[in-house]
Amino acid sequence: FSSQYPFLSRYKDKTYEELLDEFVSHPFLKTLLSIRSSYALLPSEEISVAGMAGIEMSYFNYGVSCVEGNVEQLPLKMGDALKKMGGQILTGHEVQHILIKEKRAMGVKLKDGQEMRGKAVVSNIDARSTFSDLIGEDQIPSGFRSKLKGMKPSLSYFILYLGIEGRLDELSVSNNEVFSEDHLQKEYQFLYENRISEKAPFYLLAPSKVNPSHAPKGKSTLCLSMKAPFHFSPDWNQGVKDELSRRLISRASKFIPDLEKRILVKVETTPKTIEQWTRNRWGAAYGWAQIPRQSGIYRLPRTTPIPNLYLTGHWTSPGGGIAGVVASGELTAETVWNWFAKGEY
């Protein structure tokens, strides 16, 4: 590894801040160069060089793009392609167990009693749930079990989706991230104490500016969000949601005059909602946090201690975000196919 990838080898245990310290001395320039670490929900002092490189490369190598229509079109089109190849997709069916025979994965059992057998099983759900809930810790080697217990999930989000009267001509671009302070670490000091700073950065996204079909004629869509720890609230009741919504709307009103009066539709999403939708522990938005001990070669591999069982998605490499998990799916598929090609099944 060190001879083939000398740069990665040199920085595999380093944070992005340590990399910057070698080349940059001006504090505010460091902040500007660290802005996108926010997309991984980590400050530069904690995000790994490998994790940050993945984010930056996707921008500087290929530019920014979005899916035509809605982002849901991506999985839907992939699903259509699978069906055309003779594949089958079951929705609304929860997996109860991963079936193990002679210490090998051989399929899944659904909660309605159906059993689906296969030569390979691929899991993209929360890695802890995969092994603890669907297999059982007694089936897993002690070393791997200890590694899982020591891994740290990423932070989550509080998201406010709004339907707005009128166009959003006040915004020059659709994707905005607003920072009130020039030291990014301050926000995380609050988050790690299960608090959210009044000055916390927030995202101000206007999807209908990119694609007008997102809203009826004369209307707009707006998405306001900020990082949130799962344990900020024990139950995320309506009072908590209303307070965080008020904060976001108040701050966004500096960019969009009379915003509150223009709101037609309002929907809140909390870390608890994300946990319920995805079963990601604590509503983790990006699987494991991209800290050095959980990034690059230290992230969970695609292969597992259970033969024929594979991982994909943001619990394995390269990490979170749409680009990361699509790459992960492609790499896992390649791994499985190589085993088939060798006749290992």
Image (tube, helix red, strand yellow):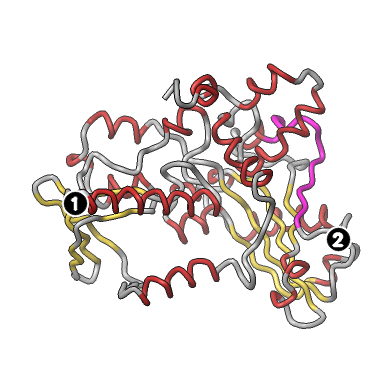
What is the residue that sits farthest to the bottom in this orientation?
A: 217
The boundaries of the magenta stretch are: 175-187
Residue 29 makes an appearance in the image: yes
Residue 116 lies in the magenta-colored region:
no
Judge by depth and name the residue closer to the eye, 278 or 77: 77
Relative to 129, say whether 83 is above or below: below
Q: Give percent across and percent down for residue 336.
A: 29, 51
Query: Badge 1 is on which residue?
Result: 105
Image height check: is 199 above or below 85?
Answer: above
For marks 2 and 1, the one nearer the N-term is 1
The residue that disc 2 covers is 171
Instruction: Give me the C-alpha separation between circle 2 and circle 1.
Output: 52 Å
Q: Is residue 307 left or right of residue 274?
A: left
- Which residue lies at the image location 18% right of the left edge and 41% below the top edge? 139
Q: Secondary structure at mark 1?
A: strand
Number of labelled discs? 2
Near mark 2 (Cα within 10 A), the count class, few <14, some 14-19 or many ≥20, is some
On the rendered image, what quadrant is the N terminus found in?
top left
Residue 128 percent coordinates (x, y): 35, 44
Residue type pointed to by label 1: Ala
The crowding category of the residue bearing disc 1, from other C-alpha atoms within 10 Å (few below 14, some 14 to 19, many at least 20), is many
Q: Is residue 91 above or below residue 198?
A: below
What is the three-letter code of the residue carrying label 2?
Leu
Q: Is residue 181 magenta?
A: yes
Q: Is residue 285 visible?
A: no
Q: Residue at x 63, y 62 (%)?
A: 268
- Seen at 52% across and 19% down, the residue is 10
